[in-house]
Amino acid sequence: MKAPAHSWCTTAWRTYWRCQTGAAAAEFALTLVLLVVPVMNVVDLGVYVYDRMELENAAQSAVQTAWAQCAATGQVPATVNSYCAGLSAAMTTAAQTSSLGSGVSISSTTEDYCCPGSSNGALTCQGSVTNTTPTACASGENPGDYIFVTVSYSYSSFYPAASIVSLLTTPITHQAWMRLA
């Protein structure tokens, strides 16, 4: 005589719950998913921060190149009337010497007459060197000729679907400035 179907199901169900074969592997697989996602986010965030620092260095390299090529030789204002020939190409080359390489682009270069601010180090700019005659600063000093360079880099997340970095701004931009004269 055949056992009723419900007793066979009950027996199979009890056997399934008592069986330990593969349980550790299944638990490890579930736990691994919970551990890997945060680690992926930490790695991706670390690379984003590193690339941001490299972009800051690239911007600083570009303005230092402008100073070395133009201000040191007395060719200022550097961005007008071709006083400093080859400046744009030299700045781009300098910015792309970082580990980010050709992914770095110079999005803007401006040159203004500016006065140093008070104790906070901020600049008060009077306008572009192309169309502004400088007037004395509040301190009585003559304003300086400052160059401003904005660089950008498009960061792409390693894990866009699971990373919090994909919520951060991209492209990354940074501005650096330096007094030329």
Image: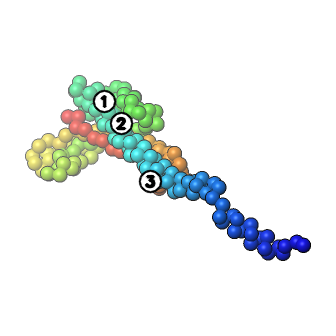
Q: Tag 2, which secondary structure?
A: helix
The residue shown at (23%, 34%) is 180
Q: Is residue 167 left or right of residue 88?
A: right
Q: Amino acid at mark 3?
A: Leu
Residue drawn at the location 30% of the way across and 30% of the way down: 65
The spot of residue 133 in percent (x, y) is 22, 42
* Distance in Å between CA atoms under marks 1 and 3: 30 Å
Q: Vertical placement of 30 versus 181: above or below?
A: below
Task: Report x, y in % for residue 84.
Answer: 31, 27
Q: Amino acid at mark 2?
A: Ala
In the rendered structure, which disc, 1 or 3, sits on the residue that comes first in sequence?
1
Q: Is residue 67 visible?
A: yes
How far, Cα to Cα, is label 2 from label 3?
Answer: 20 Å
Work out which quarter of the rendered image holds the N terminus and state it: bottom right
Disc nearer the start of the sequence (1/2): 2
Identify the residue at image location x=78%, y=74%: 7
* Picture quadrant where residue 13 is located: bottom right
Camera-side residue of 50 and 138:
50
